[in-house]
Image (cartoon, rainbow, N blue to C red):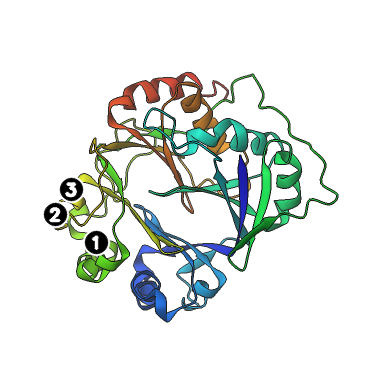
Amino acid sequence: MELHILEHSLKVASIAKEGIQVCTHGLIKLAFLPSKTRCKFFSLTETPEDYTIIVDEDGFKELPESEYLSVADATWLALNVVSGGGSATSSQPIGVTKIAKSVIAPLADHNISVFMLSTYQTDFILVRERDLPMVMHTLSSEFTLLRVVNGETVAANCSGVTNGFVKPKLVPRPIIHPLSSPSNMFCVTSLDPDTLPSVATLLMDVMFYSVGSWSGKQPEASSEDSGHIRFFSFSLIEGYISLVMDEQTTRRFPNNVLFTSASGELWKMVRIGGQPLGFDECGIVAQISEPLATADIPAYYISTFKFDHALVPEENIQSVIGALRTNESTGP
């Protein structure tokens, strides 16, 4: 398999809910007028707590300095696993479970913190730029390492990098953060960029203004069923659009605009974290993805500035909660 190190230098930031209007102009430009910017990597995710932005350096210039904007203290690089050869089938694990044991677990074993962004098209593993030498050292025996330079894929410079891959530990990795499962059912979907103008007004309403029906309620992280929560994710990355929204929101879109799978699959969420997780702790993604990979349960995984979110097929949610509860730490 190939591990592509993308050329984007990324910033991860949070916009406070009460300050979103300060950034709306720049965000609309990034989402709906990409030809007016040089941005190639943009993602915006709304949670009950805030908005999380992942954006390249050109896109970051579109955002104003503001007391409402908090930026993580690092530059991040996006990694992408590309399987050579045969086509994927619906029975194969998709999302983060496909790379849990080959990428996520080894990085956790080497104390490398990751920030995940699953999209309709693929999965991006974000690592700090300063950690890249150790990432390459860890994964170089398992993957062909390639860098994207000016849009061209070339062999990564591995001089001084030894094959240091360590197989994931066989002992369970205990889950140490509280888990909760909102009652919403979610869709992971996309749309043709050519149709974006026709639904731009609707998308802007969903992204920035549709807050009245949510009453500002935030879930109790310690409860297993948190009721409905506000969660919406929009990504425009290298020309491809990805959307994650709850089933109710999808009904607002015209027929035949959103891509749907043949099964019309719906996803349930597991939220990870009682208090904001921060960026320095290692192994959070591995704690969740390894048990799912062992059980062959597909999952999308979206990290945000304060909490993490895994999406699993609706019919698997009870077995997922059970498997993760089994792995929960019993320590104080």
Q: Amino acid at mark 2?
A: Asn
At 56% from the left edge and 44% from the top edge, which residue is drawn?
A: 81
Residues 235 and 270: in front is 235
How many marks on residues? 3
Instruction: Please state the horizontal and vertical placement of residue 283, each as a whole percent of the image.
Output: 60, 36
Closer to the chain start, of discs 2 and 1, is 1
Amino acid residing under circle 3: Gln
Q: Is residue 234 visible in this depiction of the protein?
A: no
**Element at label 1:** helix
Give whichever of discs 3 and 2 has the lower sequence position.
3
Q: Quick one: which residue is furthest to the right in this view?
A: 160
Q: Given contact means CB atoms under 8 Å apart, are the residues at marks 3 and 1 in contact?
A: no
Marks 2 and 1 in Cβ contact (< 8 Å):
no
Residue at x 41% of width, y 35% of height: 299
Residue 6 lies in quadrant: bottom right
Residue 240: x and y in percent read 40, 60
Residue carrying label 1? 206
Circle 2 residue: 255
Position of residue 165 in the picture relative to residue 331 (left or right): right
Say which residue label 3 marks: 248
Q: Residue at x 36, y 78 (%)?
A: 25
Of circles 3 and 2, the one toward us is 2
Q: What whole-number distance in Å separates the C-alpha atoms at marks 3 and 1?
A: 11 Å
Q: Is residue 229 above or below residue 50?
A: above
Quadrant in the picture for residue 113: top right
